[in-house]
Image (cartoon, grey):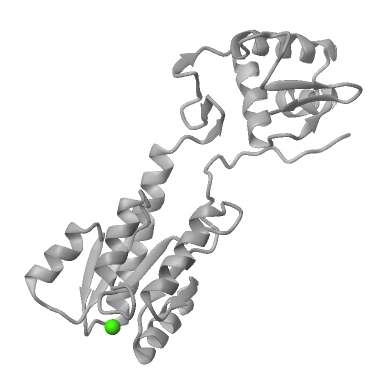
Amino acid sequence: MLSLEAPQQTSAQPLTQTQRILVVEDEDVIRQMITIALEDEGYEVLVAKDGRTALSLLEEAAKNSSNPPIDLVVLDLMLPQVNGLDICRLLRYQGNIIPILILSAKASETDRVLGLEVGADDYLTKPFSMRELIARCRALIRRQNFSTEISSPCRKYQDLTLYSKECRVVLRGEEIALAPKEYRILELFMSYPKRVWSREQLIENVWGADFMGDMKTVDVHIRWLREKLELDPSQPQYIITVRGFGYRFG
Ligand code: CA
């Protein structure tokens, strides 16, 4: 019997994954203390001693989706090259919604307000306790994960989006109605784009190993799915027939 892992985890980013924090701080002692404290909490820490390095690390993480993402930036304000406020401003201007915790030696209310105005999520004035810093980091990451989970489409391919938690499928801006098995096939396909599935594998994953019916059942469901998804079901762009093997998505 073929056995394939059924993808039950629908969140794009499992919560068990190690979270990465970028610490941008030019003062060696403070940077090292923060790094140690965060690593003790199980976070992976990247460091930058100046604004330009910070921006290039963030850019790299954002442009290459195969790299693990950076989940939070701990950002000092007074930095060589590019200062913290400008980094904040630039990231938000670029549409980057990464959580930012500003660290500042300046205690004045104006700086705090300015920091939050340019798009920082939270603000901590030096000196601060490591316990306080960790609590703030944790809260920001949790908030971000939560909002990503509820707002982001779970699976997207071209103009087709599948919202796993809501069992909804939107195609070219309109919701389409799928029967439960059709939905399950599509969810499986979209979880593993380009992967080729044999009829047996689809039966096992969608109908279950004890399914007694005919393998043609798969072809019938694929035909129904294509009629609902494809602009031209005879020239499918989503569900492709792989001759001699089965089907693949995309
Ligand atoms: Ca500084």
- The quarter in which the N terminus is drawn is top right
Asked if residue 18 is positioned above or below residue 212 in the image, the reply reads below
Whole-percent x, y for residue 213 in the image: 82, 12
Q: Residue at x 44, y 19 (%)?
A: 173
Q: Residue furthest front?
A: 81
Q: Residue at x 32, y 65 (%)?
A: 87
**Pick the front one: 131 or 195:** 195
Q: Residue at x 56, y 28 (%)?
A: 158
Whole-percent x, y for residue 120 in the image: 25, 61
Asked if residue 184 is positioned above or below residue 212 in the image, the reply reads below
How many numbered marks appear? 0
Asked if residue 37 is positioned above or below residue 214 in the image, the reply reads below
Whole-percent x, y for residue 174 in the image: 45, 15
Whole-percent x, y for residue 249 in the image: 70, 27
* Ligand 1 located in image quadrant: bottom left
In the rendered view, does 170 fall on the left or right side of 130?
right
The image quadrant that residue 126 belongs to is: bottom left
In the rendered view, does 193 fall on the left or right side of 40?
right
In the rendered view, does 49 fall on the left or right side of 102?
right
**Pick the front one: 232 or 179:** 232
